Image (tube, grey):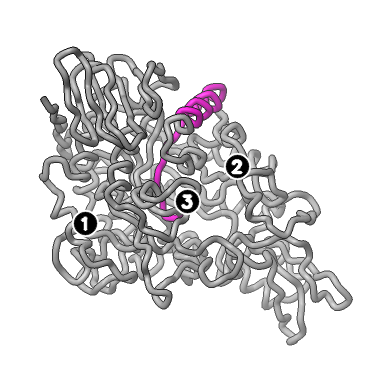
């Protein structure tokens, strides 16, 4: 007899507010939903998502059952890198609205029982930031140049970059400027696009400015900050050569002279003092790509940041042995510093996991082929239930609750990822996970807005829409809603810092957390396991037998309750 999961009711606005108000250390087991504003909802029909669009969809996020919303950058920006090139940290870019819209969004989110986390980009600014523009105008010797990394070039006429560092987006990490008198001049450092010059965090004015920016948004009422390139602010003294001509392959494997330097931690200790002045348990979340999860733990010591993204988990293949190893290592690394583990499967920089898992292993986190859609979705649903059963905080990227795949066949002429246009850098195919999400079956942009969408949506997108899945038993949207409702209702989910592994067949993960048991079959065949009690929820149809066993289909996760 097959056992169907039961769905937990979505909280009403009143109960959601009450729940948030009573929870302490909310961030330790929070589910945080990433909104990529340009691709979430368009309120004015210009083809670009905006803050008012996000505000209009807050009831959807409340009913989904998440605790907080992380907004990717909406600051004033030339948009050379989709807003991660900030020209003014205290202004909203007109394409997204204005400060009044931001204020209304923060207030309405609070009324809906949702917290707002905003992106902060402290490693670099836009080349249109007033500091950088003045540094160029004022010429050599300008005090503004000390706030960035300006250096004379090597070679007889300074025609060579100051060192051999390579940009993450491809090519040299240095660009030579033309001085005000028209002559070739100094070089400036940019670990990403040339339009994103790196700040020099050795200069006190940079620290002063960002402490002021923190207070500005905290006073606006935000609940925290996701720190972009949190590992990159401090560079090794003297900016030494790296000596490798294939540097990108070293990322995530070694401590680089421009990443994960120990000096970043003093910056975050200063920031933590500011955050702790404010009531309401505001938090910091680090985007810190480090060689090991143990080094990631350095960012979340008690006097620094609260959470750090677990990229080691995101990059793990759909394999029981590998998943168990990274879960164990993560929990062990976070336990000594008292920080919660975090779990994430997708974001705006990697191929959606419904497509990653549709492809053979070993292709990395940016994949150009669609793979087997049916297999990918099945594995993605199972992976989500596994992630949500682990102790700590989980992150959901917009549209994954709809089972969206990556759009891998965008025409070259519509691509906007800056890495796509630079050789030997990142693959440059991040646009595929940024295509605006579908809300309705029909319409010029499937309910995203009235004026099309800034990236083309594929045919058939409407059948994956919220409208197509809402209220449909077994749909991916309803699976997420049920899982988040159960997680919120059960204290043995999310809390704690350990799991009790249970004996399981090869290719199967099984662990207990109090009276709750999670079983994940990562194989391509059905497996029989003990029936650990009543099936709370499953990503596929679980069959029970009379002798206390359960049959899990291929690539399926089931949640059991002993009571």
User: Which quadrant of the figure has residue 167?
Assistant: bottom right
Residue at x-position 28% and y-position 70%: 453
The residue singled out by tag 3 in the image is 365
Dot 1 surroundings within 10 Å: few (below 14), some, or many (20 or more)?
A: some
Residue 223 lies left or right of residue 487; in this view the side is: right
Residue at x-position 18% and y-position 61%: 462
Relative to 11, is 359 above or below? Answer: below
Dot 2 surroundings within 10 Å: few (below 14), some, or many (20 or more)?
A: many
| Sequence order check, earlier mark of 2 and 1 | 1
Viewer-proximal residue among 264 and 393 = 393
Viewer-proximal residue among 114 and 360 = 360
Residue furthest bottom in the image:
182
User: Which quadrant of the figure has residue 380?
Assistant: top left
Residue at x-position 30% and y-position 62%: 436
Dot 3 surroundings within 10 Å: few (below 14), some, or many (20 or more)?
A: some
347 drawn magenta: yes
Q: Nearer the viewer, mark 2 or mark 3?
A: 3
286 drawn magenta: no
Mark 2 and mark 1: Cα distance apart in space: 37 Å
Location of the C terminus (image quadrant): top left
Viewer-proximal residue among 143 and 69 = 69
Please provide percent x and percent y for residue 326.
Answer: 50, 31
Which numbered dot is residue 453? Answer: none
The residue singled out by tag 2 in the image is 290
Q: Secondary structure at mark 1?
A: helix
Range drawn in magenta: 324-349
Q: Can the viewer see residue 369 in this picture?
A: yes
């Amino acid at each position: 007899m097959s056992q169907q999961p039961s769905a937990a009711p979505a909280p009403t606005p009143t109960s959601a507010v009450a729940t948030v108000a009573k929870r302490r250390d909310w961030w330790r087991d929070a589910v945080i939903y990433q909104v990529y504003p340009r691709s979430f909802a368009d309120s004015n029909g210009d083809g670009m998502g905006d803050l008012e669009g996000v505000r209009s969809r807050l009831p959807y996020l409340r009913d989904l059952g998440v605790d907080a919303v992380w907004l990717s950058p909406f600051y004033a920006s030339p948009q050379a890198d989709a807003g991660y090139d900030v020209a003014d940290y205290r202004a909203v870019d007109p394409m997204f609205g204005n400060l009044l819209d931001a204020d209304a969004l923060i207030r309405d989110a609070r009324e809906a029982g949702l917290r707002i986390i905003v992106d902060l980009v402290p490693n670099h600014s836009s080349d249109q930031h007033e500091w950088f523009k003045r540094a160029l105008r004022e010429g050599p010797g300008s005090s503004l140049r000390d706030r960035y990394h300006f250096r004379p070039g090597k070679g007889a006429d300074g025609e060579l970059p100051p060192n051999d560092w390579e940009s993450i987006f491809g090519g040299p990490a240095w660009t030579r400027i033309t001085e005000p008198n028209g002559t070739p001049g100094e070089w400036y450092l940019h670990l990403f696009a040339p339009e994103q010059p790196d700040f020099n965090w050795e200069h006190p004015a940079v620290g002063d400015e960002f402490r002021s920016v923190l207070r500005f948004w905290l006073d606006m009422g935000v609940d925290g900050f996701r720190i972009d390139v949190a590992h990159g602010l401090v560079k090794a003294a003297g900016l030494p050569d790296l000596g490798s001509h294939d540097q990108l392959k070293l990322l995530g494997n070694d401590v680089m002279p421009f990443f994960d330097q120990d000096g970043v931690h003093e910056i975050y200790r200063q920031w933590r003092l500011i955050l702790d002045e404010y009531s309401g348990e505001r938090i910091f979340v680090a985007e810190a790509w480090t060689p090991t999860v143990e080094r990631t733990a350095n960012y979340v010591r008690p006097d620094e940041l609260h959470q750090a993204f677990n990229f080691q988990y995101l990059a793990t293949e759909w394999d029981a042995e590998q998943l168990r190893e990274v879960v164990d290592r993560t929990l062990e690394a976070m336990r000594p510093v008292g920080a919660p583990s975090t779990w994430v499967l997708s974001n705006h920089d990697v191929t959606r996991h419904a497509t990653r898992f549709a492809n053979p292993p070993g292709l990395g986190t940016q994949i150009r082929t669609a793979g087997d859609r049916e297999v990918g979705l099945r594995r993605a649903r199972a992976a989500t239930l596994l992630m949500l059963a682990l102790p700590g905080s989980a992150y959901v990227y917009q549209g994954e609750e709809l089972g969206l795949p990556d759009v891998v066949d965008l025409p070259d002429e519509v691509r906007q990822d800056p890495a796509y246009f630079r050789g030997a850098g990142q693959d440059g195919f991040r646009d595929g996970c940024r295509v605006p999400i579908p809300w309705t079956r029909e319409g010029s942009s499937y309910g995203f807005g009235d004026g099309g969408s800034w990236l083309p949506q594929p045919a058939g997108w409407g059948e994956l829409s919220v409208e197509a899945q809402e209220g449909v038993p077994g749909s991916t949207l309803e699976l997420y809603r049920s899982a988040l409702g159960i997680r919120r209702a059960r204290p043995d989910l999310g809390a704690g810092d350990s799991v009790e592994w249970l004996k399981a067949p090869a290719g199967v993960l099984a662990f207990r957390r109090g009276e709750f048991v999670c079983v994940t079959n990562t194989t391509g065949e059905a497996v029989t396991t003990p029936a650990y009690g009543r099936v709370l929820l499953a990503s596929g149809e679980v069959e029970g037998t009379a002798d206390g066993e359960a049959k899990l289909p291929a690539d399926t996760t089931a949640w059991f309750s002993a009571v």
